[in-house]
Amino acid sequence: MAENSMLTSLLPLVVLFAIFYFLVIRPQQKQQREHKNMLANLQKGDKIVTNGGLVCEVIKPEDDFIKVKLNDDVIVRIDRNFVAKKLDKIESSDEK
């Protein structure tokens, strides 16, 4: 009888943890995995946005850093950890 009441008291906690896992933890892990794959697949000519909001073009992906072109004259190296996202061709076509 004591085991039965202990099981029924732990059941809501288990259900709550399962809901938390599927609504918070699992999607976050999926997003981190996709971001890691995006960083690994950066190529010359890709347009990226940094965490600081700069839009730049990848010149040469290196191991820890990425050489990017900010404009025609400025080429810098940024840490891979500071790449927020990769712009699609449709998004980057709004330059004038």
Image (tube, rainbow, N blue to C red):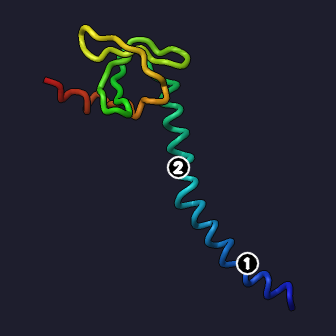
Q: Secondary structure at mark 2?
A: helix
Q: Could you tell me residue 23's position as x and y percent?
A: 53, 61
Quarter of the N terminus within the rendering: bottom right
Residue for point 37% across, 14% down:
76
Residue for point 40% across, 34% down:
84
Give the tally of numbered discs: 2
Kind of residue indicated by mark 1: Leu
Work out whether 94 lies above or below 9. Answer: above
Q: Residues within 10 Å of mark 2 (few under 14, many from 20)?
A: few
Residue for point 47% across, 23% down:
79
Q: Could you tell me residue 43's position as x and y percent?
A: 43, 18
Residue for point 57% across, 60% down:
22
Q: Is residue 70 left or right of residue 2?
A: left
Q: Please tell me which residue lies in front, 66 or 38.
A: 66
Q: Is residue 87 left or right of residue 62?
A: left
Quarter of the C terminus within the rendering: top left
Q: Is residue 51 left or right of residue 31?
A: left
Q: What residue is shown with label 1?
A: 10
Q: CA distance from mark 1 to mark 2?
A: 26 Å
Q: Secondary structure at mark 1?
A: helix
Q: Residues within 10 Å of mark 1 (few under 14, many from 20)?
A: few
State which tag comes first along the sequence, 1 or 2: 1
Q: Is residue 33 left or right of residue 88?
A: right
What's the mark number on residue 28?
Answer: 2
